Image: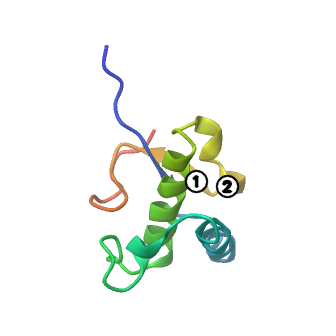
Amino acid sequence: MLQAKRWCIAYPGANPGNLQNDINNICSSIDCSSIQPGGSCYQPNDLVSHASVVFNLYYKAHSSQPSACNFGGDAMFSLSDPCKDQFSVTL
């Protein structure tokens, strides 16, 4: 049986301050140029969308281990790519 591909995204109800801190911390060690102006994942230009892209970059950099998608409860799994799709289907 095939397992659906999962992405790690920001929980839409997460505290904005926590999300910004997470982005700052993760982007100090991972290339986050995709969420900068002109980057491939810059739009939509909002905190939850950018945090979702960054969370997923971190998750993928850590071999998609479930423990790499936590962020103090500010993250969740999705079946939609945070850079390309709306967050319509979650696990």
Say which mark, if any, is on residue 75: 1
Disc 1 on helix, strand or loop? strand
Residue 25: x, y in percent? 68, 69
Residue at the location (43% across, 69% down)? 49
Q: Residues within 10 Å of mark 2 (few under 14, many from 20)?
A: some
Residue at the location (48% across, 54% down)? 56
Up-down relation of residue 57 to residue 66 (above or below): below
Residue at the location (50% across, 68% down)? 31
Nearest the viewer among 65 and 87 is 65
Q: Quadrant of residue 58?
A: bottom right
Residue 48: x, y in percent? 49, 70
Marks counted in the figure total 2
Q: Is residue 9 left or right of residue 39?
A: right
Disc 2 on helix, strand or loop? helix
Q: Is residue 32 left or right of residue 3?
A: right
Up-down relation of residue 36 to residue 53 (above or below): below
Quadrant of the frame with the N terminus: top left
Q: Amino acid at mark 2?
A: Phe
Nearest the viewer among 17 and 59 is 59
Residue 9: x, y in percent? 48, 55
Say which mark, if any, is on residue 71: 2
Q: Is residue 10 visible?
A: no
Label 1 vs label 2: CA separation?
6 Å
Residue 50: x, y in percent? 46, 71
Q: Is residue 28 visible?
A: yes
The answer to whether the residues at label 1 and label 2 have Cβ atoms under 8 Å apart is yes
Q: Is residue 26 left or right of residue 90?
A: right
Q: Amino acid at mark 1?
A: Ala
